[in-house]
Image: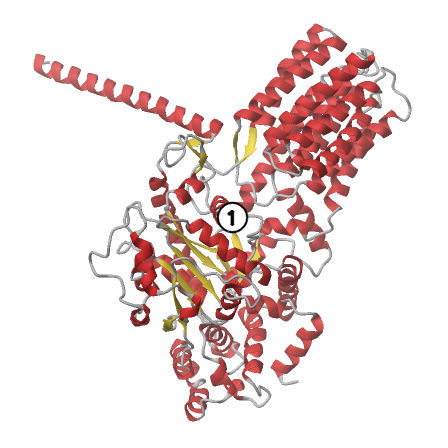
Amino acid sequence: MAPGRRDDSGAASRHVDQRAKARWFSGILQAGGDISVNVFGWDRRTPAAWADALAAEIAKHWQREYRLRLLGHPLSVRWRPADPELVQPWDSLAALVGTWPGRPDDLEGRWAAGPGELAGEKRLVDVLRRIPTRRLVVLGEPGTGKTILLVRLVLDLLSDAERTAGAPVPFLTSLSSWDPVQQELDDLLEQRLIVDFKGLHRRVAGGVHGRRRRCTLARALLQEHLVLPVLDGLDELPEHLRGMAVNRINEALGAGGRGLVLASRSAELRAALRPPDGIETEVAGAAGVELLPVPAEEVVEHLRNGAMGPAARARWEEVSERIRAGPAVPAAVTLTTPLMARMADVIYNPRHGELLSSVRRTPAELLDRRFATADHVRNHLLDAFVPAAYRYLAPEDLRRRLRWLRFLARDLQVRRNVTELDWWRLGDAGPALLPGLLVGGLAAVLGVYGLRIPASAGIGLMAAVGGGLLGRRLFGTGSSMARALGGGLIGGVAGTVVAMLTFGAVQGTGPSLTGALAACITVGSMGGFRAGLLGAFAGGFAAVLTGRPEVTAFAPFVNGLGLGLGAGCAAVLARRAEPARGYHWSLTGLLTGLAAGLTMGLAAGLQAGPGRGLLLAVVTAVLGSVAGGLEAAPADTAALTGPALSLAGDRRTFWATGLAGGLAVGVSTGLGPRFPPGPGSDFSFGLRVGIANAVAVGLAFGFLRAAYGRYTVARTWLALRGDRLPRRLMSFLDEAHQRGVLRQNGAHYEFAHQDVQERLARPPADCSEGHKRSRGG
């Protein structure tokens, strides 16, 4: 082989080695980055990079949703400038922009000279672009198409022609469940972003705007003005909260250049801005448009053109002729909104793949004399919409789906007074004490069977529960689970030490710490750090005070009662405002679990000798670190979750955290000091103790850190009732979404319109009466 060739080969080999080293080094850096993200929750990517990823996910979601919500070509909606009394003067908008730092002037002449020019635009995105402040209020009566216009606005803003890299991302969300008295707007938006999108829980190292404190990526996006809030449903808030909501919106807008789009019904916004006996307010720096009714002739022509085939189109001829001849007929008054057009399209026009013979209703019935007013026509369309969406089903299957939908509508309308159908909120739709009775009952039975140890353990648990409930009443709820465990650990150790110093008791040290640390899990659901501190202190103190090495006949029942009470309280009181979306490692939890393991080892060493104490310390420190450090959190992408994926992530969190917590406490107590002592009973006794504690504590951990436990109990109970919910609820909700009965926004479902929800939520007597009217009975 020639020398030159050997040299080339050597150079190539060295080049390959360098590339391999570079890949190895970059892999180390990537691994370090993953550790920093998963352990500390920090993320080094800039908010602008996340905004671009978020924009792509939002665009994909709303493209799918837009196709589902529109069964054909959309109606052309027109608007006019909003009433000047509901918006700020146009001259003040340009003046306001001049006070914003870094906001350029209208160099290209895009700004409108006045509100009258806003009515000449054909797209809402063009209207928004011509407003100096980029703040727009969209007004309209029910069914005029506000929500679908907002969806179209979001898609237009995210199109390649409109959006540039790093530009604000439009985020469409509903205000129906917002409590502006207790929550600021940015807090609501941060919570919604984290629920709807994976990865936005992560911490941004170094903070934003030069601040040193860390915040979530969702909060960073808001603070950097990389999110354009598109808020729907202000009118769906209770009347007494709407004025406060407007004030909260103005506070969030602040003195900077944040844009905003807000939709509401006209009368409700007027009452909020101009209360007869209150303080007047306005949406700061906002212009407005008001949607106009669509001419009935245009709506009927739209429906006629959307029919599949000449025979289907011919069915609309009679309606078209009557409306042209007499525009005052009730059907002509009703068919002037996109909502009514959609209802009529579903009811009277066959869909793709359907035979015309399967559509038994004909449009001519809209002209029947039994529909004497426009309200009669409207109610008929709303009542017939859901059965028409499921007309391919057998009658019995249709009746079951109607019962399920009516239960969900009543739950939203009566119990919660909102429009957002969140699966994790259904955990409260069943009996409030049912989760506690099931979990507590199982834990109590296992405790009676397995906890044949001194009654001091059960007494300590009951004292801890009482102290935790008192702490919840005094201090409220607030801190994270890791901090609650830390408070319980400190309180348990402090209570034990104080009791030992006061009474000179050493015999009850092991059982007292076991009971106190198990109580940490219970009291963590009751109020966080301070409640955990108080409850575990009471538990540790009571356990040492009553600790005796003898096992009496009633001790298993006392211990079972304490274990059942603790686990049952955790299941009853652990209500989550949002679902868990996976899990990550918490440094605080890791350290707390490590400290708990070492403390348990010390207690075992005092009672059973240094050999067992060292073994117990090592095993419990490892398992406790896993149990304490495993926190519920989203995964590491910006992907939109959706209801099904949200449930799947929460379910994984439930089982993973429950398994980790149960193993940590179960193994540590199973290997702990034995009561009564004796070599023959060690293994079977430790196994019973470990199983009892593992099941009870594991279930408590799962209920505390995920919504899946309460949701499953409530869903199963309601399904067994027969007429409330189906056994496979998520499949049913997805089917309803595909049929257009429900609409989806991130992890939330809603009914196709608030009016559909209200009609389904009516009492059965009203439903049957409306059904008879629609059939002509």
Residue at point 87%, 19% (across, down): 551
Q: Which residue is mark 1?
A: 184
Q: Is residue 211 above or below residue 394?
A: above
Q: Is residue 195 left or right of residue 16?
A: right
User: SS class of the residue under badge 1?
Assistant: loop
Instruction: Let me know if residue 550 appears in the view.
Output: yes
Residue 286 at what x, y percent from top left? 39, 60
Q: Nearer the viewer, residue 634 or 17?
A: 634
Query: How is the rendered protein coloured?
Result: secondary structure
Q: Nearer the viewer, residue 143 or 279?
A: 279
Q: Is residue 766 above or below residue 153?
A: below
Instruction: Let me know if residue 620 appears in the view.
Output: no
Residue at point 20%, 20% (across, down): 15
Residue 595 at what x, y percent from top left? 62, 18
Residue at point 17%, 19% (across, down): 12
The picture quadrant where one finds residue 603 is: top right
Residue at point 74%, 51% (across, down): 431
Residue 162 at what x, y percent from top left? 28, 55
The picture quadrant where one finds residue 97 is: bottom left
